[in-house]
Image (cartoon, grey):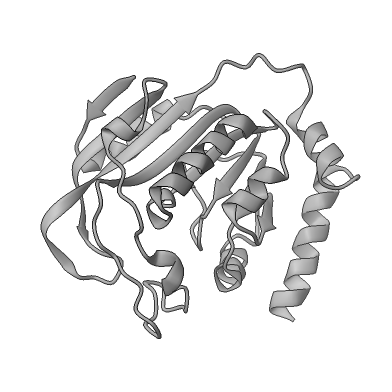
Amino acid sequence: MSVIFIEKDNLNKYIKKKVKPANVILDIGCGINPQKIIKPKIHICVEPYSEYVKKLMEKTQFGNFVYLTMSAEEALMRFPDKSIDSIFMIDLIEHIDKESGVILLSQCERVAKKQIIVFTPLGFFPQEYIKDRKDLWGMDGGFFQEHKSGWELQDFDDSWDLLCVKEFHFDDGYGNRFEKPYGAIFAVKSFKDNSPKRTVTNLIIKNIVPSAIEKIIVKIRNKMKKIFFS
């Protein structure tokens, strides 16, 4: 394990050096903002809330995006071992309880071939769900924005590399200012690629739908556009 503390302004520069290029990624719990650290050939967004998915599609009309409207657990169960290059979970695990988060990380370790990239606050800070209150994007997804766990450095074992910022979050998701800022962690787990020489694309074709990956994207995008934009 390596643990590096850096200033907030330098975080993007450091994480871009740490994350490897990837052809196919899972971007789990991305809400309306898919990760922008790398540009994969196939960007699979996993988001359970349909209102977020609709907005996500509006923002990503031009690109190789696939959208799965389901939970992280459901999505990961659909993929065989070591079938996805990298998995991103940006601002996700703090929204589930610690036990479920540990299980989710273990499933990511099963599916990811190159890396797992997690971003979460350093420690717990409260962000509660209040019925009928709009979320930070003016939508009705407040239930998904509640914080249910906090993650410390010791929650990641020696197989992870940690980039940490002591002062990152100065207010919660509703603009309420903290008395004292909270930190943040980028946790990156890298794997040696000892898998058989099969392409990720072929695995996706075999295990999701029997067609070329380009056709998958076109069909899903066209179908979703008809649903959301007609």
Q: Quadrant of the C terminus?
A: bottom right
Residue at the extreme left of the image, as rendered: 179
Q: In which quarter of the image is residue 24?
A: top right
Q: In which quarter of the image is residue 49?
A: bottom right
Of residue 158 and residue 221, the one placed in the foreground of this image is 158
Residue 175's place in the image compared with 187, above or below, is below
Of residue 38 and residue 73, the one placed in the foreground of this image is 73
Relative image position of residue 189 (x, y in whole percent): 46, 27
Residue located at (56% from left, 31% from top): 109
Residue at the extreme right of the image, as rendered: 210
Relative image position of residue 40 (x, y in whole percent): 61, 39
Of residue 124 and residue 42, the one placed in the foreground of this image is 124
Residue at the extreme bottom of the image, as rendered: 132
Residue 227 in view here: yes
Classify residue 30 as left or right of residue 4.
Answer: right
Residue 22 in view here: no
Residue located at (21% from left, 33% from top): 6
Residue located at (82% from left, 40% from top): 207
Classify residue 134 as left or right of residue 226.
Answer: left
Q: In which quarter of the image is the N terminus?
A: top left
Relative image position of residue 26 (x, y in whole percent): 60, 44
Residue 132's place in the image compared with 13, above or below, is below
